[in-house]
Amino acid sequence: MEEARAGRQLLEALGLRERKGLDLIACPSCGRAEVDVIEIAERAQTALTDLAIPIQVAVMGCVVNGPGEAREADLGIAAGRKRGHLFVKGQVVRVVPEDQMVDALVTWAQIIADDGVEAALAMADTSAAAEAEADRQALLESKGDDANDSGTKVELIRKL
Ligand code: SF4
């Protein structure tokens, strides 16, 4: 059963089968994440599965690298500075409080299903993109551009 579901999702992701349901992806989380990505992704999966909408959704743990993936999905959210940046087809449409991230995904998935992507984009908050960029810059300033200290880790591995 699980294998069949994975196979179906693979075909849908490759565009070889019409999407029939939810395809939710989440980042693996890392030192930059400011939320419990897995917990939010699980709640989103449960809430969105109940809607039975054919849609790809991305749940990302930070607003620095998360938007890249979130922009690729039909609907995406990236967390940071106690807020969630909500994307529809790559455009920031809302910045919502962290505790409303799952509700926002459900609301906008329903808008896309009922009225289509163009209608959803027309409802975008015009100040959302600037707010999102301000959050992103603030996070970069507070954590630097290498929150996972990958440079040090690479040096340690090289010495092994
Ligand atoms: S950099 Fe951001 S999006 Fe990437 S794994 Fe870490 S928290 Fe997730």
Image: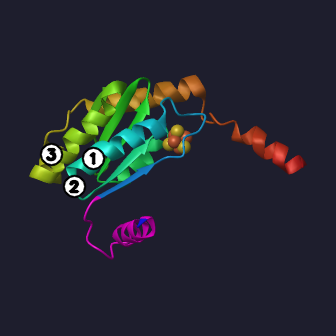
Q: Amino acid at mark 1?
A: Leu
Q: Is residue 86 magenta?
A: no
- Residue sitting at x 41%, y 42%: 41
Q: Is residue 122 left or right of residue 24?
A: left
Give the secondary structure at mark 2: loop
Q: Which numbered marker is on residue 99? A: none
Mark 3 lies on residue: 111
Give the secondary structure at mark 3: helix
Which residues lie in the magenta part?
2-21
Quote the CA–CA distance across marks 3 and 2.
11 Å
> Within the image, what quadrant is residue 30 found in?
top right
Tag 3: Cα neighbours inside 10 Å, few (<14), some, or many (≥20)?
A: some
Q: Name the magenta segment's main secondary structure.
A: helix
The answer to which of 1 and 115 lies nearer the viewer is: 1
| Residue 60 x %, y % | 44, 42
Mark 2 lies on residue: 53
The answer to whether the residue labelled 2 contacts the one labelled 1, judged by CB atoms less than 8 Å apart, is yes
Q: Is mark 3 within 8 Å of ligand 1?
A: no
> Within the image, what quadrant is residue 19 found in?
bottom left
| Residue 115 x %, y % | 9, 51
Task: Name the image colouring.
Answer: rainbow
Q: Is residue 76 visible?
A: no
Mark 1 lies on residue: 48
Quote the CA–CA distance across marks 1 and 3.
13 Å
| Residue 67 x %, y % | 41, 43
Give the secondary structure at mark 1: helix
